[in-house]
Image (cartoon, helix red, strand yellow):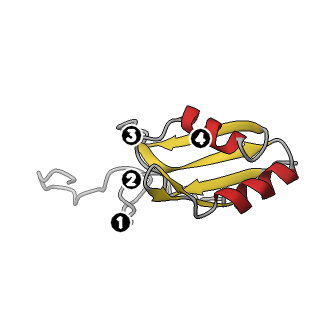
Amino acid sequence: MEYKLYVGNLAYDVSELDLQELFAQAGAVKSIALIKDKYSGQPKGFAFIEMENQAAMENAIATLNGREFKSRPLAVSVARPREERRDFGGGNRRGGGNISGPRKHKAGTNRRPY
């Protein structure tokens, strides 16, 4: 069973070590995932923290939700399961194109297909 927490409203200078020290006060921490932008590497202001057991998770919510940490009130709650996302195949999602290949033009014209 997973005992995963969502932690939001984090200051952008918070590190995984900061979170480890803070959440260890509530109970044993199993793992920490500080979410960062995949291009810039900058933190996005939220994390997922997995606690060792139900009691540690509940204690973390009770004691840390709303608590000020680095001048910001933390939002601590049970993490929801990740929703399935539809794969649109990338691109600009405007649609209207033919996926079988380039457009054909009338015979006898010298126009390019695009």
Question: Can you identify the residue that label 2 sits on?
Answer: 91
**Residue 72 figure quarter:** bottom left
Question: Can you identify the residue that label 4 sits on?
Answer: 19
Name the residue type under label 2: Gly
Name the residue type under label 1: Arg
Question: Can you identify the residue that label 1 sits on?
Answer: 94
Percent across and percent down for residue 30 are 76, 36
Percent across and percent down for residue 101 are 39, 50
Q: Secondary structure at mark 4?
A: helix
Q: CA distance from mark 2 to mark 3?
A: 25 Å
Q: CA distance from mark 3 to mark 1?
A: 30 Å
Q: Secondary structure at mark 2?
A: loop
**Residue 71 figure quarter:** bottom left
Q: CA distance from mark 4 to mark 2?
A: 37 Å
Rendered image: mark on residue 42: 3
Q: Earlier in the sequence, mark 4 or mark 2?
A: 4
Q: Which residue shows up at 22% across the image and 60% down it? A: 106
Q: Which residue shows up at 65% across the image and 57% down it? A: 64
Q: Are marks 2 and 1 in contact (CB under 8 Å)?
A: yes
Q: CA distance from mark 4 to mark 3?
A: 16 Å
Q: Earlier in the sequence, mark 3 or mark 1?
A: 3
Q: Earlier in the sequence, mark 2 or mark 3?
A: 3
Viewer-side residue, 67 vs 30: 67
- Relative height, residue 30 to residue 7 (above, below): above
Q: Earlier in the sequence, mark 4 or mark 3?
A: 4
Q: Nearer the viewer, mark 3 or mark 1?
A: 3
Q: Secondary structure at mark 3?
A: loop
Name the residue type under label 3: Gln
Q: Secondary structure at mark 1?
A: loop
Percent across and percent down for residue 98 are 40, 59
Q: CA distance from mark 2 to mark 1?
A: 8 Å
